[in-house]
Image: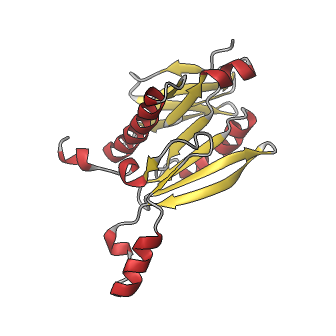
Amino acid sequence: MQDYGYNYIDDPVVLEMIDGKVYMMSRPNDRHLIIQRNLSEIFRNHFKQNKKKCTAISEMQLYLDDRNYVQPDLMVYCKTNNEKKNRKVPVIVVEILSDSTWKKDMTVKMKKYAELEIEEYWIIDPPSQRLSIYRLEGGQYELHDTYYNPSEDSFSAVPEIREKQRSELVREFAPPLFPEMTVSLEEVFSLEDLDII
C-alpha cells in the first residue's frame, strides 16, 4: 500500500508544493489551532466510542505526487477506505481558512483533493464561524451544506425576530460520511481555552 502521509510537525514553517511551486507559510495562530484541536477531538471521541477503525490527524503532510504535497489542517482516515482504494487516502480533509491561505484552499487545493478522490472537503472560516461541507460528485466538489455558529450580536434587535432566528438555527449536524455522528458547532468554535494559554 502506498503511504500518502508524512509528519513534519517540528518544522518552524509549513511547506507545501503545488504543481512544482513551493509555498512557505507560517504556523497557524492560537485560534486556528484550538478549532483544529476541537474538531479533531470530536472525530476521535466518536471513533473511539463507536469502535470505528478511523482516526483524525493534524500536522501531517499529504503527498499527492513528486510535484504536489500539502498539509491540510485535519485529515480523517478510515481503514476500510484504505483497503478499498489500495492506498492510504483520507476520506475527509479539513482546511481552516486564514487571510493568507483562503484563495489557495478554495481553488488549487480543492482541485488537488478532488483528483485524489477524497470524499469530503470541509472548509472552516473562523471569523464568520462558518463550516461548509463539499462532497465529491463526478470528480469535482459540490457544496453539500453550510452551517453557522453566529454570535449573539448577529441576531436581530427586535425580540420576536431574534427568538425566531434562534429557534431556526442549526446548532449541530451529522456529517454525510458518518450519519450517526453529531457535530456541535458550539464545540467546534469554542475558544474557552484561549483564557488559559
Residue 55 percent location from the top left of the image: 50, 26
Q: Say which of 72 and 47 sits in front.
A: 47
Q: Position of residue 177 (x, y in %)?
A: 62, 40
Q: Residue furthest top?
A: 1
Give the colour scheme shown: secondary structure
Is 9 located above or below residue 111 in the figure? above
Residue 144: % across, % down: 65, 54
| Position of residue 89 measured from the top left corner of the image (x, y, whole percent) | 65, 26
How many labels sit on residues? 0
Q: Quick check: 185 left or right of 179?
A: left
Q: Quadrant of residue 155?
A: bottom left
Q: Residue at x 43, y 76 (%)?
A: 165
The residue lying at 45 percent from left, 34 percent from top is: 46
Residue 57 seen in render = no
Residue 182 visible, this angle: yes
**Of the pair 164 and 113, the residue shown nearer to us:** 164
Foreground pick, 120 / 181: 181
Is 74 rendered above or below residue 11?
A: below
Q: Residue at x 61, y 21 (%)?
A: 79
Location of the N terminus by quadrant is top right
Residue furthest toward the left? 196
**From the viewer's perspective, is 68 left or right of 77?**
right
For residue 145, which quarter of the picture?
A: bottom right
Classify residue 70 by image quadrant.
top right
Q: Residue at x 33, y 85 (%)?
A: 159
Pick the quarter of the image with the C terminus. Answer: top left
Q: Looking at this rendering, what residue extends furthest in the right direction?
A: 138
